[in-house]
Image (spheres, grey):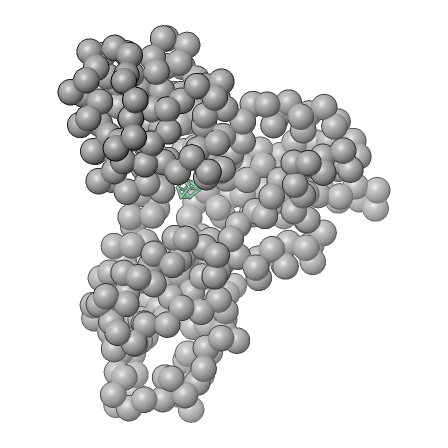
Amino acid sequence: MAKEIIIAEHAGFCFGVKRAVDIALMQQLTKESKAYTLGPLIHNNDMIQRLKEKEVFPIHISELDQLNPSDSIVIRSHGVTPDMIKQIKQTGARLADATCPYVSSIQKKARKYMDLGYQIIIVGDRNHPEVIGINGWCDNTAIITKDGSDLPKLPPKVCVVSQTTQRLANYEKVVDLVTKQCEDVQTFNTICKATSDRQNSANEVSKKVDFMIVIGGKNSSNSKKLFEICSLNCPKTIFIENKDELLADLLKDSTIEKIGITAGASTPDFIIEDVIAKVREIITL
Ligand code: SF4
């Protein structure tokens, strides 16, 4: 019986990451100018390599003094603090802001409500670049909490926002705790649907198949999460970075009838297409 391939409806690049990669690739280069991204643009080694081949290189904030005014520097989808923007502008290099519009909207809310006298609370991971960036927009005065368990005594006016990739349960827990303590509470569920869409699709597909392939960078936390979800539904789930890691023997098992494929939000289309092509080739041999 011919094996069937089922591809998750929501897989691969989210809107914000695709936009950031497009912006990086659009930088006009001349012999004298170079394009940089402030940190690796996405958690995917193959994509970073492809960007390097197109003369777009990651640079650390501490290396900004190496920039020439003819160079351009791309801000990642996570966004940065106003202070970092100032530092980049001081170099004279051209700034290409690829902050995801969903993230920019959180930054603006944090600034607006801080100016209106609210204490900003960010539900998220304090070391994540997106959270560091948002905190910068409210002058680094935000209270950052993962699930509310470490909240200090709060003032009467509080505004709650969330890191875009946070779990809804954590956000709801914080809102619940804050609402009980404070008089004036403004809440904004700023969790991005791209994450839950990918997780729901992966969950659905992995329930229907005998073998599941998750494609993503080894250091991509959203891809690892997809692997965890799929493994619970389908014990034969593998996590690969690209087609080279897909071993043909695994798919030749005669008990496998349906093969599912999904990919994290930082996995580019060309890698997904390569894997699909290799799977087709193996199962038709
Ligand atoms: S996950 Fe959502 S918020 Fe983050 S870059 Fe993608 S689209 Fe933007």
Residue placed most toward the observer, 21 or 130:
130
Residue at the outermost right position: 32
Q: If the picture is divided into quarters, which one holds ligand 1?
A: top left
Residue at the outermost left position: 180
Q: Position of residue 6 (x, y in %)?
A: 30, 70
Q: Quadrant of residue 74?
A: top right
Instruction: Look at the image and tell me in which quarter the N terminus lies.
Output: bottom left
Q: Position of residue 2 (x, y in %)?
A: 29, 87
Q: Quadrant of residue 226?
A: bottom left
Residue that appears at 60% across and 55% down? 48
Residue that appears at 29% across and 26% down? 151
Residue placed most toward the observer, 253 or 174:
174
Residue that appears at 45% across and 77% down? 246
Relative height, residue 229 to residue 65 (above, below): below
Q: Position of residue 241 (x, y in %)?
A: 48, 66
Is residue 87 in sight in this rendering? yes
**21 on left or right of 147:** right
**134 on left or right of 176:** right
Q: Position of residue 197 (x, y in %)?
A: 29, 50
Instruction: Look at the image and tell me in which quarter the C terminus lies.
Output: bottom left
Relative height, residue 268 to residue 87 (above, below): below
Is residue 273 in sight in this rendering? no
Relative height, residue 44 to residue 26 (above, below): below
